[in-house]
Image (cartoon, rainbow, N blue to C red):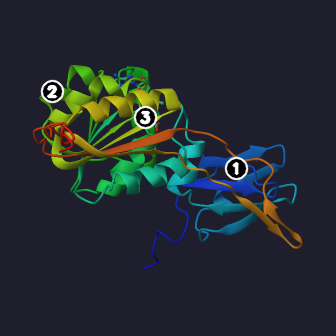
Amino acid sequence: MADVRLKFQDGEQVLLVDQRGKRHLIFLRKSEAFHSDRGWISHDAIIGQPKGTLVRSSLGLRYLALRPTLAEYVLEMPRGAQVIYPKDLAMILFWADIYPGCRVLEAGMGSGALTLALLRAVGAEGRVVSYESREEFARRALANIHTRMGEVTNLVVRFTAIEDGVRDEEPVDRVLLDLPEPWKLVEAVAAVLRPGGIFLSYLPTIIQSHQLVETLRRCPAFSLIETFETLFRPWNIDGQSVRPFHRMVAHTGFITVARRVVPVDREPAPAVVEPAEPE
Ligand SMILES: C[S@@+](CC[C@H](N)C(=O)[O-])C[C@H]1O[C@@H](n2cnc3c(N)ncnc32)[C@H](O)[C@@H]1O
């Protein structure tokens, strides 16, 4: 029997990329058509074709038909709140060391970009509990998740601010926050995060990151605190033109990571040793 993953199916999502690189994310529906200023394409011309196929519009223009990667999907899916970009999602998954079976607490869910990445990384054996204070954003995020992944069994959504529920949560392996004032949650995060676990926060400004780091430093339950940003600079490689692109996404956000440790009594300050009196 043919492997259905290799060929486009009725009802499946497809990313159509035209010759200018313009992208369109659509659902394939039998007997329907995709229309643009560059002509139309019958969905039936794509259904049953291998992924990566070139199709032509009614005006003879070429489109590449692909199953969108998660990064492509995140950039094209409908948004409530601003999403975390794929360059940062990639770093977050590794720096927070998300693994299959991991138990993650997340807030805010926003449009669900990070939630999608987390759900895939923790797998069916893991669990993501996600807080979102604005119900319309949480509903948007859930719709985005269902469109991409269908029904999921490893996600629990809490339609409220994290402050309202974090104290009742079971211990987790990781806490990831994408909200404006994470320093207010440091004590609560320390209480819910297992020793050895990882806390990660994503913030748009260095002022906020500074305030978070200062608060983490004062909390003996956290150590190995680091803050960084990811600069992603694509290059144009075309014949003699080998150089960075003129434009890039210059700034998105700062990532702060800290390890939850077993607090020890603070080292006593070294006693002041008076210099010996000369003989
Ligand atoms: C930048 S968006 C998150 C984007 C999301 N991480 C994504 O990748 O799509 C920030 C979200 O945090 C939510 N939020 C702000 N404060 C919150 C809180 N205390 N508890 C839960 N959600 C909160 C906001 O409503 C907003 O949707």
Identify the residue at the far left of this view. Answer: 265
Looking at the rendered structure, the secondary structure element under dot 3 is helix
The quarter of the picture where residue 122 lies is bottom left
Q: Quadrant of the N terminus?
A: bottom left
Identify the residue at the far front of this view. Answer: 279
Q: What separation in Å lies between label 1 and label 3 (alpha carbons)? A: 21 Å
Q: What separation in Å lies between label 1 and label 2 (alpha carbons)? A: 43 Å
Can you give x and y, in whole percent of width and height, for residue 267 in the image?
14, 41
Q: The residue under label 1 is which amino acid type?
A: Arg
Looking at the rendered structure, the secondary structure element under dot 1 is strand
| Viewer-nearest residue: 87 or 79 | 87
Query: How many numbered badges does the structure rendering display?
Result: 3
- Name which residue lies at 40% across and 27% down: 211
Callout 3: CB less than 8 Å from ligand 1 = yes
Which residue is identified by label 2? 167
Q: The residue under label 3 is which amino acid type?
A: Ala
Identify the residue at the far bottom of this view. Answer: 1
Say if 215 sits above or below 64 in the image.
above
User: Which one is closest to the eye, mark 1 or mark 2?
Assistant: 2
Which residue is identified by label 3? 141
- Pick whichever of labels 2 and 3 is earlier in the sequence: 3
Q: Could one spot residue 106 in this view of the protein?
A: yes
Res 23 label: 1
Can you give x and y, in whole percent of width and height, for residue 124 in the image?
25, 56
